[in-house]
Image: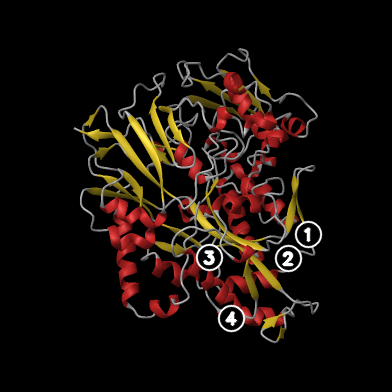
């Protein structure tokens, strides 16, 4: 399973958006900027690399990073960013995310036997010098599946592995379907499945975990204490090109070379990730304080003429969204349970709120054209799986009002009431972030006010990142809807995000039709590409109509990179979990 993760902030707009956009000039600037961004390369220029040097990277966030240095336990994009110099995946891919044999391990699928065989290469070692073993592969599954770890990674998708469900439910002490033919210290793990799935040849398929966990290092820590342990929080080990050298909790991490790295010595002496307030990023880029800094798109015009940097860009496999809470996660049953009486469990209400959002105008203007509305929950990068015929929710206040009128949400004074006549107050959870975040979220609240809906921020203000996801994950009472974002797996299966048996389905919606479509798109019939595409299209239309989760926007991700740096690439065959291959990144001679 690829590490789907939360995007750390949401950039929206001020209430003056539509007036300003209507001026014309802003639109022209926006279009020009979008054209410029689309022409940026995916990689830095190829130059002769030299040994040595320190690479300083800005991590734009207005909150300390959580510091859970375990891919099995962390769900934060910030932690994933900061872990990337050490946390290498087991598999490499080509530019279409198809797994090849060039990585730390190889994968062999046998459809007749329903097995996936993972073989770790000899010499792939943890940063303490120990060989990565078959037990390390199994242990990663145990961390995810054992309820005591409270990992958010567990999904019913894993239940195709024999014995996984029984282990997750505490009925078995081991996962029977993971075989180690050469013993725990061998390098081969054979995963026995009830069936293989069509996406399993690709990274990010959601059925196979693509990392390992150091059993020898963590085995004496009870699962309940794993996430808070020093060996996860302060002294983690990885088998990637760098190891953790120095940690200032919540603020910075210094990485130094892993002398046991299987591909050889990295070029750089150090990589330092440093937390920087989003409001300070543009000044940091202009003053060359960092060698790598992601451009905050609403600050693009401030940095676009900076000398001495190369701009490298991509449209990430990601999207932001508005989600409506309609149920809870049942930990005992390990599934989402929908509440038919939930306030937001009315399709008309959800649709009307989606039509009231001025999404496209807002994002294009306030990010200088570098963000754009997306119509469906399948990004266009997935090619024919993306359904071009689904137009999404374009701004239409008249339609929003008509839908509410027809559904019986009548006005009683300033605000509408529920169809049963009871007052209606909608509590909206929104994350803090960029400087524009406060007025931005007020824009949407005002849009909903225009159609007679009384929407209020949870707690009366924006919520800090860590607290925000704690409330979302644990179904905090008093949250009716929230805005968040995903970076996605590189295989389009939607089971790990929206199925009945995944904790990541934070809206908590469960319907027979959704279950059916999700199963069909990953079924044995779906080995036929045309059939699978058809099911993806049906699912997008269904999700658009139901509006439990409404996609809002995606963006050009632009990094400003010191022009003395070479080897930095966003190409799938040249990256690791969406990050450059850090052992290749270097200063040019």
Q: Residues within 10 Å of mark 3 (few under 14, many from 20)?
A: few
- Secondary structure beneath dot 1 equals loop
Identify the mark nearer the N-term, 3 or 1.
Answer: 1
- Residue found at x 66% / y 49%: 473
From the viewer's perspective, is residue 444 above or below residue 247?
below
- Residue 387, percent across and down? 53, 59
- Secondary structure beneath dot 3 equals loop
Q: CA distance from mark 2 to mark 3?
A: 26 Å
Q: Is residue 188 visible?
A: yes
- The colour scheme used here is secondary structure
Which residue has dot 1 on it? 339
- Residue 406, percent across and down? 71, 81
- Residue found at x 49% / y 50%: 63
- Circle on res. 389: 3
Q: CA distance from mark 4 to mark 2?
A: 21 Å
Q: Quadrant of residue 148?
A: top right
Classify the position of the N terminus by image quarter.
Answer: top right
Identify the mark nearer the N-term, 4 or 1.
Answer: 1
């Amino acid at each position: 399973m690829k590490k789907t993760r939360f995007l750390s902030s949401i950039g929206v707009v001020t209430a003056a958006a539509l007036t300003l956009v209507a001026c014309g000039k802003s639109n022209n600037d926006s279009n020009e900027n979008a054209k410029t961004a689309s022409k940026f390369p995916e990689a830095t220029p190829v130059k002769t690399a030299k040994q040595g040097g320190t690479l300083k990277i800005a991590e734009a966030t207005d909150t300390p990073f959580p510091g859970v240095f375990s891919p099995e336990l962390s769900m934060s994009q910030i932690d994933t960013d900061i872990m990337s110099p050490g946390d290498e995946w087991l598999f490499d891919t080509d530019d279409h995310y198809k797994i090849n044999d060039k990585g730390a391990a190889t994968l062999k699928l046998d459809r007749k036997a329903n097995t996936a065989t993972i073989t770790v290469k000899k010499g792939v070692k943890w940063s303490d010098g120990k060989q990565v073993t078959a037990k390390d592969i199994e242990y990663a599954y145990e961390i995810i599946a054992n309820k005591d770890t409270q990992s958010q990674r567990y999904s019913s998708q894993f239940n195709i592995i024999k014995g996984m469900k029984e282990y997750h439910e505490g009925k078995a002490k081991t996962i029977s379907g993971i075989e180690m033919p050469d013993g725990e210290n061998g390098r081969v793990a054979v995963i026995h499945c009830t069936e293989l799935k069509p996406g399993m040849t690709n990274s990010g398929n959601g059925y196979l975990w693509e990392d390992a966990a150091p059993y020898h290092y963590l085995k004496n820590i009870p699962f309940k204490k794993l996430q808070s342990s020093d060996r996860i929080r302060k002294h983690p080990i990885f088998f990637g090109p760098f190891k953790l050298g120095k940690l200032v909790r919540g603020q910075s991490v210094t990485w130094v070379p892993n002398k046991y790295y299987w591909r050889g010595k990295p070029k750089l002496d150090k990589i330092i990730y440093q937390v920087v307030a989003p409001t300070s990023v543009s000044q940091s880029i202009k003053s060359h304080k960092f060698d790598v800094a992601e451009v905050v798109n609403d600050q693009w015009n401030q940095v676009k003429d900076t000398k001495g940097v190369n701009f490298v860009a991509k449209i990430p496999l990601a999207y932001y969204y508005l989600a409506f809470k309609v149920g809870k996660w049942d930990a005992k049953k390990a599934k989402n349970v929908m509440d038919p009486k939930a306030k937001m469990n009315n399709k008309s209400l959800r649709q009307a709120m989606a039509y009231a959002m001025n999404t496209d105008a807002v994002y294009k203007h306030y990010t200088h054209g570098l963000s754009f509305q997306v119509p469906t929950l399948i990004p266009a990068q997935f090619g024919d799986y993306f359904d071009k015929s689904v137009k999404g929710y374009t701004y239409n206040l008249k339609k929003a009002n008509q839908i509410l009128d027809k559904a019986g949400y009548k006005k009683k004074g300033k605000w509408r009431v529920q169809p049963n006549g009871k007052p209606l107050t909608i509590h909206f959870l929104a994350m803090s972030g960029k400087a524009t975040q406060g007025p931005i979220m007020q824009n949407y609240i005002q849009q909903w006010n225009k159609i007679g809906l009384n929407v209020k921020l949870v707690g009366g203000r924006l919520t800090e990142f860590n607290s925000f996801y704690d409330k979302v994950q644990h179904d905090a009472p008093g949250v009716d809807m929230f805005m968040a974002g995903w970076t996605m797996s590189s295989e389009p299966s939607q089971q790990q995000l929206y199925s009945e048996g995944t904790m990541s389905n934070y809206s908590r919606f469960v319907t027979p039709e959704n279950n059916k479509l999700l199963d069909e798109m990953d079924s044995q019939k779906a080995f036929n590409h045309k059939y699978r595409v058809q099911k993806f299209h049906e699912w997008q239309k269904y999700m658009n109509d139901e509006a439990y989760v409404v996609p809002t926007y995606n963006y050009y991700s632009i990094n400003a990179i010191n022009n003395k740096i070479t080897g930095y690439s966003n190409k799938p065959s040249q990256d690791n979990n969406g990050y450059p291959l850090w052992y290749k990144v270097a200063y040019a001679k």
